[in-house]
Image (cartoon, grey):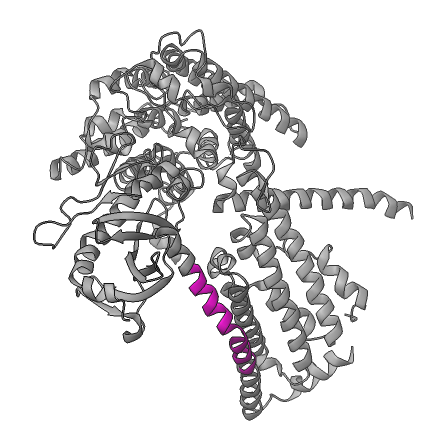
């Protein structure tokens, strides 16, 4: 769990406290994710429900299979695989074919976690590893967006959802046309053209736009993050650092040139930033433990996100920003280790 | 293993003389040099033909009917066009293309230029055909690109996209110094003017890159072509 | 170490000392040029040619080359045959030459070739060296075909350019991209390591009984 700021509580020994179990933390994360998932099902209908279920089930099944094959105790019960699956599902577009979702789930757990030695040893956030694989493997499907709140979304799937395994998904152009939304352009607000022609930040805030299944409603994600914060299962510095640095950097750029760079509110509420900052960057295994390290880590994510969004050709940069920051986490940890009590500063260590 | 023994044991006692090593290296270098020279002599002709063939085929695809190419090096900075034969170390980026008409007469068809620009992933290199009479771009072909397979590489394969370049308006302004309307890529289905390129839905970045590289080249190449039009029409013949 | 028999010179490289899957050498072309079977075959041929010819020449010169300058001589010889290969590929097919990009020139620094010159052909006779080059070359080709096959089938849904699954197959683009090369290589190394370990485990009990 997060390193608390030094408090003034003075206790006599023994100082042993019962640590929170992985199980309890993960269960709380799952609870916190539930409203986000429910909203996405409300917005995108049956397809979102199937997508999230398949993502979760494929992750749990892979975890179970890996445990069996490697002869380790079964770790399905600690909910971590389920949370990974849920997060993976929330980052995918609602029209994403289910067979690709299952591939993503297997990659998340198999490649992102099991190969590193299981929970606690993985360098990268498993859900994002799966998402990055899917982005590279199926670039078309991963950037096909459908509008929210379509009539009859609870009765029928988006046509591409039920694509036969290994075959191309059905085009969704007709589905989008049938949805009959004039302003809809077939892309997230973040897609390059949208950056200059701003979407209304309030719409983004309330989740009235298209986008990945679980990233549209910023306000709900904030509330759920608040719950985790209150339960003391979330390091507040990470979302603060990420969102703050994105806001500050894009604000400065917007002041310099308002025509090229979108405003800071748009940047903070659009795309997967909110979901990434609150639920993925805060993954305890892959983020630093020292207070200073956490600040470096979270500001790094914010800066890379802004740079990729504004200067790169990709529409979204949060995923790669978090993965890159995950990669430097061990280094940040080494740099920011506090001095062990009783030893002197570095100078003496060389003598 | 006598060979190994003969090879290593004596050297363990006394180091080899420098002169021997120099002579040996010289001899090996000579042998290697000879091998390379022979290989070059054997293959040079074929390689030249292969490369010429590739260029001919590519130009023929962009400007059908062209049977004879006259190569030029256009210096867009200095604003000069020189026949390839008169430049040393220059790379051809402009072809004057000639075909034959019904009576078998040699006829000027138009120009094909090479253009390059930054795509989604790496540089995109392309050829485009320009007809000075119609003042339009009549053909376009990507020579090399590293665009994402299945997405960005539609700029090569997509027929609808290639249809943009059968009659793309690149008319010059009044004093013939630049295009009257810059070439721009617009969103899929939003093309309204003949100088616009209709982007591929889902491959906007690559489509825009194509528009940008065409515009960058055409803005300068086409006025240059018009300045030297008489010379190009004659084609050095 | 005794000189290997003619048969061993040839056979070792194909399987037991497979340059890619066992020695983990020559990763650069194995990762970069295996996005299609055609490229893999072209690369294998190029490497095999350089291996055989440079092995032969190194072996011929082995008695005159002192150890102080041996690496310089090896590199000179290898670079020569790589240049010849470069010309030859360009003469055979320009599209293949373009697909292979800088990786023909990079055969010079391919560890397989230098390691065979150093470890084998500078110590063995010409015939054995040629056999060794052929064996290693075949081993390398098998590895590249394994890589190229997986990557082309998954990444383009075809084998040697022939579509396998019809027009509706959704290609896994990642396998054509460089990252797919790493995934594929990792998977093959995993399979080989697992298989060898199993083999070793099965052998042990027999050894005890005997």
Furthest-front residue in view? B103
Up the image or down, C131 lies above or below A223; here it is below
The total of numbered circles placed on residues is 0
Q: Is residue A35 visible?
A: yes
Q: Quadrant of residue B165?
A: top left
* Image quadrant assignment for residue A198: top left
Q: Position of residue A297 (x, y in %)?
A: 34, 37
Answer yes or no: is residue A5 visible. Answer: no
The picture places residue A331, in percent across and down from the top left corner, at 40, 44
| Near-viewer residue (A246 or A207) | A207
Is residue C52 shown above or below A169? below
In magenta segment, residue B47: yes
Pick whichever, A270 or A297, lies toward us.
A270
Q: Residue most toward the left?
A: B175
Which residue is pictured at 17% across the width and 58% down the height? B226
User: x%, y% of residue C33?
Assistant: 53, 53
Is residue A137 inside the magenta stretch? no
- Asked whether C130 or B127 is in front, the reply is B127
Q: Is residue C126 above or below residue A210?
A: below
Residue A272 vertical placement versus B179 (above, below): above
Residue at image position (55%, 76%) is B42
Name the foreground residue: A228 vs C167.
C167
Instruction: Give the dominant element type of the magenta stretch: helix, strand or loop.
Output: helix
State left or right for residue B195 relative to residue A236.
Answer: left
Direction from residue B208 to residue C41 in the image, left or right: right
Q: Which residues are magenta?
A: B34-54
Which residue is painted at 77% across and 70% down in the image?
C1
Residue B138's spot in the image, x, y percent?
A: 29, 47
Left or right of A159? Residue B83 is left
Please tell me which residue is depicted at 43% across the width and 16% down the height of the picture. Answer: A158
């Amino acid at each position: 769990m997060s390193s608390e700021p030094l408090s003034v509580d003075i206790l006599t020994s023994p100082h042993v406290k019962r640590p929170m179990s992985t199980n309890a933390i993960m269960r709380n994360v799952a609870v916190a994710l539930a409203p986000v998932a429910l909203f996405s099902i409300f917005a995108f209908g049956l397809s979102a429900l199937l997508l999230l279920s398949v993502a979760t089930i494929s992750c749990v099944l892979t975890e179970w299979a890996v445990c069996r094959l490697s002869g380790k105790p079964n770790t399905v019960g600690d909910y971590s695989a389920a949370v990974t699956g849920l997060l993976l599902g929330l980052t995918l577009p609602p029209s994403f074919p289910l067979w690709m979702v299952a591939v993503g789930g297997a990659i998340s757990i198999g490649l992102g976690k099991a190969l590193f030695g299981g929970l606690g040893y993985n360098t990268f956030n498993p859900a994002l590893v799966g998402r990055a694989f899917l982005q590279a493997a199926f670039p078309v499907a991963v950037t096909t967006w459908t509008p929210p709140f379509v009539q009859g979304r609870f009765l029928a799937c988006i046509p591409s959802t039920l694509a036969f395994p290994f075959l191309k998904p059905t085009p969704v152009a007709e589905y989008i046309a049938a949805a009959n939304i004039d302003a809809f352009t077939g892309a997230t607000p973040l897609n390059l053209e949208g950056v200059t022609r701003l979407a209304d930040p309030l719409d983004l805030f309330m989740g009235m736009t298209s986008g990945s299944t679980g990233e549209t409603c910023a306000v709900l994600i904030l509330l759920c993050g608040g719950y985790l914060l209150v339960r003391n299962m979330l390091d507040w510095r990470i979302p603060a650092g990420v969102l703050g640095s994105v806001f500050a950097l894009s604000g400065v750029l917007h002041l310099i040139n308002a025509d090229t760079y979108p405003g800071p509110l748009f940047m903070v509420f659009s795309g997967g930033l909110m979901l990434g900052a609150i639920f993925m960057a805060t993954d305890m295994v892959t983020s630093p433990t020292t207070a200073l390290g956490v600040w470096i880590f979270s500001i790094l994510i914010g800066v890379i996100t802004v740079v990729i969004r504004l200067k790169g050709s990709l529409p979204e940069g949060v995923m790669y920003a978090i993965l890159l920051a995950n990669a430097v986490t061990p280094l940040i940890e080494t740099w920011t280790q506090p001095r062990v009590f009783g030893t002197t500063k570095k100078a003496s260590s060389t003598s | 293993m006598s060979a190994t023994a003969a090879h290593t044991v004596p050297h363990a006692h006394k180091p080899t003389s420098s002169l021997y090593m120099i002579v040996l290296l010289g001899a090996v270098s000579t042998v290697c040099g000879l091998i390379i020279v022979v290989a070059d002599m054997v293959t040079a002709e074929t390689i030249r033909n292969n490369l010429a063939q590739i260029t001919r085929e590519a130009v023929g695809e962009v400007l059908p009917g062209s049977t004879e190419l006259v190569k030029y090096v256009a210096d867009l900075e200095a604003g000069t066009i020189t026949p390839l034969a008169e430049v040393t170390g220059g790379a051809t980026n402009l072809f004057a293309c000639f075909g034959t008409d019904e009576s078998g007469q040699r006829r000027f068809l138009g120009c094909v230029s090479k253009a390059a620009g930054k795509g989604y992933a790496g540089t995109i290199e392309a050829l485009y055909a320009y007809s000075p009479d119609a003042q339009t771009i009549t053909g376009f072909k990507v020579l090399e690109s590293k665009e994402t397979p299945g997405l960005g590489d539609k700029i090569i394969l997509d027929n609808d996209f290639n249809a943009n370049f059968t009659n793309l308006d690149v008319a010059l302004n009044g004093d013939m110094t630049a295009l009257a309307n810059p070439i721009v890529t617009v969103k899929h289905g939003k093309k309204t003017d003949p100088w616009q390129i209709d982007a591929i839905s889902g491959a906007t970045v690559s489509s825009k890159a194509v528009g940008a590289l065409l515009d960058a080249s055409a803005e300068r190449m086409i006025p240059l072509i018009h300045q030297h039009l008489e010379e190009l029409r004659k084609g050095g013949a | 170490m005794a000189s290997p028999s003619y048969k061993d010179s040839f056979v070792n490289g194909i399987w037991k000392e497979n340059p890619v899957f066992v020695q983990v050498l020559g990763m650069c072309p194995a990762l970069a040029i295996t996005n299609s079977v055609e490229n893999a075959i072209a690369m294998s041929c190029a490497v095999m040619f350089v291996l055989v010819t440079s092995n032969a020449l190194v072996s011929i010169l082995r008695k005159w080359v002192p150890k102080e300058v041996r690496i310089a001589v090896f590199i000179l010889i290898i670079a020569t045959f790589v240049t010849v290969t470069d010309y030859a590929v360009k003469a055979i097919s320009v599209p293949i030459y373009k697909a292979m990009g800088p990786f023909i020139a990079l055969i010079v620094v391919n560890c397989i070739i230098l390691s065979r010159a150093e470890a084998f052909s500078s110590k063995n006779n010409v015939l054995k060296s040629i056999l060794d080059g052929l064996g290693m070359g075949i081993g390398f080709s098998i590895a590249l075909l394994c890589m190229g096959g997986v990557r082309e089938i998954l990444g383009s849904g075809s084998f040697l350019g022939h579509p396998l699954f019809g027009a509706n197959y959704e290609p896994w683009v990642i396998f054509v991209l460089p990252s797919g090369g790493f995934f594929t290589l990792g998977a093959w190394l995993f399979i080989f390591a697992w298989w060898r370990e199993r083999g070793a485990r099965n052998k042990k009990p027999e050894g005890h009984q005997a």
